[in-house]
Image (tube, rainbow, N blue to C red):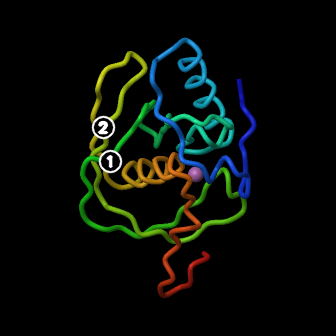
């Protein structure tokens, strides 16, 4: 089921989302719906708060298949990369954001197992962008005012 996507300045996008305590049938259905919503919107990532869910869950697909991460945390971040970002919750805007070039992320999967992912390039960017959503942070807060201007 495709869910409505909240857009800035909806207050839920600015809240710190709560940790998921238990993997339930409802959560599995939510993950499925979030993936369907992301694909329908041509996005590469989506976080719970964007569909009105105050819980720490994100979905990502940068072209290598779907990932569902529950309670994700960045455990290491190295390097720096600057690239253009947009967000389904901030339609019509994009701009340059500097982020870590490589990250390792620990999370729990839908079976309740501890998982770890290493990402670089677009995947590293997606992890950081989506985890930001769980902390109420949008990419427009991180625009880098460097040569070329913040807005693309
Ligand atoms: Ni976003």
Q: Quadrant of the N terminus?
A: top right
Relative to 141, is 102 on the left or the right?
left
Q: Secondary structure at mark 2?
A: strand
In the rendered image, the vertical position of residue 109 relative to residue 131, given as above or below: above
Residue 74's disc number? 1
- Residue 32 spot, x, y in % from top left: 58, 23
Q: Residues within 10 Å of mark 2 (few under 14, many from 20)?
A: some
Instruction: Name the secondary structure under disc 1.
Output: strand
Total numbered labels placed on residues in the image: 2
Residue at 42% in and 55% down: 125
Which image quadrant: the C terminus?
bottom right
Q: Which mark is residue 106?
A: 2
Q: Residue at x 55, y 11 (%)?
A: 25
User: Contact, CB < 8 Å: mark 1 with mark 2?
Assistant: no
Q: Is residue 35 above or below residue 111?
A: below
Q: CA gap, disc 1 to disc 2?
A: 6 Å
Which of the two discs, 1 and 2, labels the residue nearer the N terminus?
A: 1
Residue 51: image x %, image y %? 67, 37
* Neighbours of disc 1 within 10 Å: few (<14), some (14-19), many (20+): some
């Amino acid at each position: 089921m495709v869910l409505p996507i909240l857009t800035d300045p909806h207050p839920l996008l600015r809240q710190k989302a709560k940790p998921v305590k238990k993997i339930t049938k409802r959560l599995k259905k939510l993950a499925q719906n979030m993936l369907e919503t992301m694909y329908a919107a041509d996005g590469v990532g989506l976080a719970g708060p964007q569909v009105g869910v105050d819980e720490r869950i994100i979905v990502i697909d940068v072209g290598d298949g779907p990932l569902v991460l529950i309670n994700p945390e960045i455990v290491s971040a190295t390097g720096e990369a600057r690239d253009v970002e947009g967000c389904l919750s901030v339609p019509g805007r994009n701009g340059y954001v500097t982020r870590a070039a490589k990250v390792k992320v620990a999370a729990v999967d839908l079976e309740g197992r501890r998982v770890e992912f290493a990402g670089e390039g677009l995947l590293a960017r997606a992890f950081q962008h989506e985890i930001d959503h769980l902390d109420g942070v949008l990419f427009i807060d991180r625009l880098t005012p460097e040569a070329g201007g913040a807005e693309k």
